[in-house]
Amino acid sequence: MGLSSITAQIVLLRELLVSFLGNELTLGVILASWLILVAAGSFLIGKSVEKVERKLEVFVVFQLVFSVAFPCAIFLCRIFKNFLLATPGEVLGFLPIFYSSLLIFLPVTIPYGVLFTYGCKLYALYAKENAVSIGKVYIIETVGSMVGGLLITFFLIQYLNLFTIAFSISLLNSLMSIFLLVPKPKSSKTSLQKTLVISSILLCLLFGYSLLPQNSNAIHQSSIRSQWKGLNVIHNENSIYGNITVTKRGEQFTFFADGVPSITTPVPDIASIEDFVHFPMLFHENPESILILNGGAGGMIHEILKYPVKRIDYVELDPLLLKLVQEFPTPLTQSELSNKRVKIHYMDGRLFVQRTGGRFDIIFIGLPAPQSLQTNRLFSSEFFSMARGKMNPHGILAFTLPGSLTYLSPALKDLNGCILGTLKNAYRHVRVIPGEVNLYLASDSDILENLYSNEISKRFEDRKIKASLITKNYIEYRLHERWVKWFQQSMGGRKIQINSDFHPLAVFFNLSYWNSLFSPYLTEVFKWYERSSLTLSITKILLITIILATLFIKMPHLSRHSITYSIFTTGLTGMIFNLAIIFAFQSLFGYLYHQIGLLIAIFMFGIASGSFLVTKRLDQIKKDSLLFLKIEMAIILFSILFPFIFLVPSHNLENKVVYFILYGAVLIMSFLSGMAIGLQFPLANKIYLSSQPEKKTIGQTAGLLYGADLLGGFFGGLSGGILLLPILGLKETCLIMAMLKISSGLLFFLFMKIQKTK
């Protein structure tokens, strides 16, 4: 069950990110949709386990429903936009993303939630155990999730198409259904069992037939054609980093990375490429060494090579992208990638800058505005300072942000103002060339601000550069003083806000801008969240605590739900910690996909270890409530200390001793954050069951607390990367988590007092 669920989650998440052109907001919405539906299945339907007589048969029914729903959901992920009358590349707003993901996930997630609750009850019946059975099922499910996550991340995704993966999982579940229904000796099957056995056998045959390479590939190709309706898809492939789709129209190739056009060749977007390349190259007196961080192939390198440069270092994260560019070659890309002056590096851009011993005249950041915690790492004050240290005298850093020459909306002002303030904090001189796309140039040389259009035009003519867009008149137009004055007036009077690794404000501002374009009805919601503060958040937590405490005192029988509240807050803090650890790891050590997978595996191993330690001794633990309270206090302490481990300046990581100590500390933090969740869950079930000894509701208790854990994860996943970390930063977010756990600890202490008075 755990292996199947994590496989389905990762596969469907990747598919929907392609359809939704995913950013941090869409990722949060998709993940939140998954968790809320599993929680609903676990509690709302799962609690029926106490009343149902044929529990095993119901378990098998939901297992078969999951088996059928999983491959169907993949197909739905690829064709649902056809029902919404959307075309490939069209961006959907918040609400269509939310209800689409809910509808697609519904037949997969509800059965999974039900299976956990029924699994706990069935295990309890067969093993003749109570709370211990819930802990054991939780451990086994977590181990399955860990194994499944590692398998699909490092093996299955790279070598099999997604339908082959889905049919394999469905076949496995159907086979397990048959095994579960095999009667014990001297017992006979009921008519319902016979029907289910026949259904399971037929589904095994169906999934086995679908697994044949020609059938699996045919279904895969058919769904791809439906997904990219109106486009001629000639290749579709997954790497560990994402999905690459190649389309062809005439002699024109377009390479899509996770649904977003990345490279167009042999005729690229000449206007934007020439604008981005030539102004930085012309502002530098003699550019010889160039660094490109993403997006170099398909025109950018071609334009740079028009200058007498000695070396171009081109850094691209996903090797598959350039592999396919070379597999479908054009004269443009062949001339770029085969040039001896071009050195290609397949690694994280920030990690390359951190490790390289080279120095550069110009550094191009070829990424769009930061729309995730990962991409924000190339727009933070820490990275700007790091890049500054890797530049030659008079070196220039160049990148673009969304802009306008007619009206800068509040969202655009926030985004540009935040990055501009951060850039000025790191460099002595910053020049903005306003346009529909704003071009940012930063340097420690005052030449950047003292060059005018006539001098740039002279350099362009002297260097005898042939370009389609760049002319003397165009240079004068783009560098005209009126645009700079208009931009400065539009941006004037704004509070300077710094975008950093551990306070990624630019992510929120970019998502707010994205939202204003595609979901303007939520603009006020984003403005309301922007006003969030530590004081306001603590006040809300205090108010919730007072209300719940009053309710528990007046209605003592409800006080046991302090346990539910504790598990909810632990699920929320666990999700925040997992997210924070991954994003802090990326900031310090670079985006190393396999090591991110290792972090998640260690987090899951922590959950399994914590649950195992408690479950093994659950019957011997006498002071269970006191132990639970101690774990609450440990999580509070962990929340307070968590941010301080990341206070080490990034330049100190060049010291190998510091590097390995910090690396080990991050792994330990990941393990401990998972362990805290694992320690509490089995203990919570025992305490909750003992608080109502007259009702041995194993299934209902498991469903309630598992649902609360997932509901906490839902809020953590939805708010962590979009609101809490970007707006408040790592330190204040962790402090809020500590206050949240103080709240749940106080309410649980109140429950203990009420129990003693009974």
Image: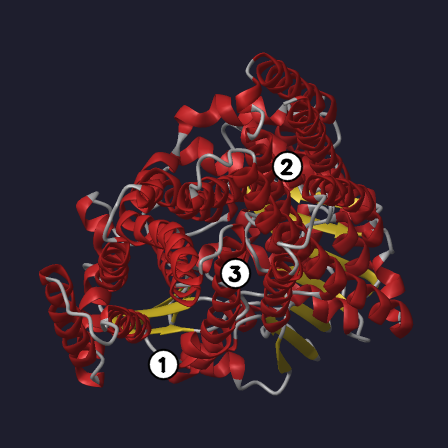
Q: Amino acid at mark 1?
A: Phe
Q: Residues within 10 Å of mark 2 (few under 14, many from 20)?
A: many
Residue 375 lies in quadrant: bottom right
Q: Earlier in the sequence, mark 3 or mark 2?
A: 3
Q: Amino acid at mark 2?
A: Leu
Which image quarter is the C terminus in?
top right
Of tags 3 and 2, the one toward the viewer is 3
Closest to the observer, 664 or 19: 664
Residue 637 lies in quadrant: top right
Left or right side of 742 for 599: left
Q: Residue at x 35, y 52 (%)?
A: 118
Closest to the observer, 212 or 218: 212
Of tags 1 and 3, the one toward the viewer is 3
**Disc sitting over residue 328 in the figure:** 1
Q: CA distance from mark 3 to mark 2?
A: 34 Å
Q: Position of residue 5 (x, y in %)?
A: 40, 61
Q: What colour scheme does the image use? A: secondary structure
Q: Which residue is mark 2?
A: 724
**Disc sitting over residue 64 in the figure:** none
Q: Position of residue 2 (x, y in %)?
A: 44, 63
Q: Which residue is mark 3?
A: 136
Q: Residues within 10 Å of mark 3 (few under 14, many from 20)?
A: many
Q: Earlier in the sequence, mark 1 or mark 3?
A: 3
Left or right side of 322 for 605: right
Q: Is residue 106 visible?
A: yes
Q: Is residue 510 visible?
A: no
